[in-house]
């Protein structure tokens, strides 16, 4: 954006999401910018621009969160919608370079552009470009992408920068030989925190929900909602907190057999459990 007058002696603009100022005289248009001088910090122009910068930050976070939901759920996204939001810089930053797929096996590539008519420009896995005209496309969860290592290598070669974590998202594939019962998965159990409240705060910071004695993550997959849960104990009866086993359920109060858990719900549940485990410490007696 351009420079705006802020009093008689300064001009202000946004630079990388921050309000910066320069003197009216003596500085070239792109030079001399700095943080805000004390004498103009309370001016209405500065306050309004700061509020606008905060709104832009919230808008960018909302766009990224919505695209992340599309990706985790592998939801079909109308190409008309992509065309409508593409001119918005925040939406474009969240969508550009994501791998999208169409109706046919060959309809796959890195999203680079969306025309007003809904025609998408893709860079195919072999490096060639192609246009895709389809009613909708899908932003697949990485656990569903065939040839994920090759796509990661291609992204590096293209210099692709994904605003939403897709290709480099940590994924876990469900083992072929797995218990048919409903016992919790204990791979990431046992990490200790100084208190339940510290563990809960860490989980919330990661974007997960704390419900009673569990940290949960809801995943929509194949038309149903599955909740992954990691036990974290009771804040009123335990001095310290430890991460417990991981379970999945598609109805309140019920546990699914791991064999019935879909690939996305499995991967996202394990991702949550691993992140909670990484934030704590494993007591010495558990590692001996």
Image (tube, grey):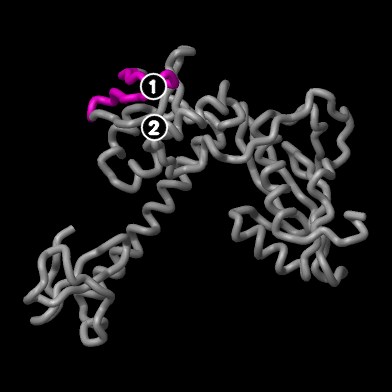
Residue 20, relative to residue 136: is it above or below? below
> Which circle's residue, 1 or 2, is located before the other in the chain?
1
* Residue 161 at x, y percent in the picture: 41, 41
Badge 1: residue crowd in 10 Å (few <14, some 14–19, many ≥20): some
Residues at circles 1 and 2 in contact by the CB criterion of under 8 Å: yes
In the depicted view, which residue is nearer to us: 169 or 214?
169
Q: Which label number is shown at residue 127?
A: 1
For the point 53% across and 25% down, which residue is it? 150
Give yes or no for residue 127 being in the magenta stretch. Answer: yes
The picture quadrant where one finds residue 79 is: top left
* Residue 219 at x, y percent in the picture: 63, 39
- Mark 2 lies on residue: 158
Q: Secondary structure at mark 2?
A: helix
Q: CA distance from mark 1 to mark 2?
A: 8 Å
In the depicted view, which residue is nearer to us: 229 or 11?
11
* Residue 2 at x, y percent in the picture: 14, 61
Q: Secondary structure at mark 1?
A: loop
The picture quadrant where one finds residue 218 is: top right
Q: Which label number is shown at residue 114?
A: none
For the point 80% across and 53% down, which residue is it? 231
The picture quadrant where one finds residue 13 is: bottom left
Residue 59, relative to residue 226: is it above or below? below
For the point 83% across and 41% down, which residue is it? 185
Badge 2: residue crowd in 10 Å (few <14, some 14–19, many ≥20): few
Apparent side of residue 205 relative to residue 214 in the rendered image (left or right): left
| Magenta region | 116-133
Give yes or no for residue 16 being in the magenta stretch. Answer: no
Which quadrant of the figure contains the N terminus? bottom left
Q: Furthest residue to the bottom?
A: 39
Which quadrant of the figure contains the C terminus? bottom right
């Amino acid at each position: 954006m351009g420079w705006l007058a802020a009093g008689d002696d300064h001009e202000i603009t946004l630079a990388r999401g921050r309000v910066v100022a320069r003197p009216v005289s003596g500085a070239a248009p792109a030079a001399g910018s700095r943080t805000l001088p004390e004498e103009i910090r309370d001016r209405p122009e500065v306050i309004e621009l700061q509020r606008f910068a905060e709104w832009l930050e919230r808008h960018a976070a909302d766009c990224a969160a919505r695209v992340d939901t599309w990706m985790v759920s592998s939801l079909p996204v109308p190409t008309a919608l992509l065309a409508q939001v593409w001119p918005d810089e925040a939406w474009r930053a969240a969508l550009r370079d994501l791998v999208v797929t169409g109706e046919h096996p060959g309809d796959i590539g890195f999203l680079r552009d969306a025309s007003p008519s809904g025609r998408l420009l893709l860079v195919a896995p072999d490096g060639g470009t192609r246009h895709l005209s389809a009613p909708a496309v899908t932003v697949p969860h990485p656990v569903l992408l065939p040839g994920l290592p090759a796509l990661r290598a291609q992204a590096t070669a293209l210099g692709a920068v994904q605003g939403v974590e897709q290709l480099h998202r940590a994924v876990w594939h469900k083992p072929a030989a797995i218990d048919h019962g409903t016992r919790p998965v204990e791979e990431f159990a046992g990490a200790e925190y100084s208190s339940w409240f510290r563990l809960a705060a860490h989980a919330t910071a990661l974007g997960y929900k704390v419900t009673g004695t569990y940290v949960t993550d809801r995943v929509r997959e194949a038309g149903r909602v599955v909740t992954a849960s990691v036990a974290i104990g009771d804040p009123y009866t335990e001095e310290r907190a430890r991460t417990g086993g991981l379970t999945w359920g598609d109805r309140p109060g019920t546990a699914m057999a791991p064999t019935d858990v879909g690939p996305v719900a499995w991967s996202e549940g394990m991702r949550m459990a691993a992140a909670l485990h990484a934030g704590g410490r494993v007591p010495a007696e558990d590692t001996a």
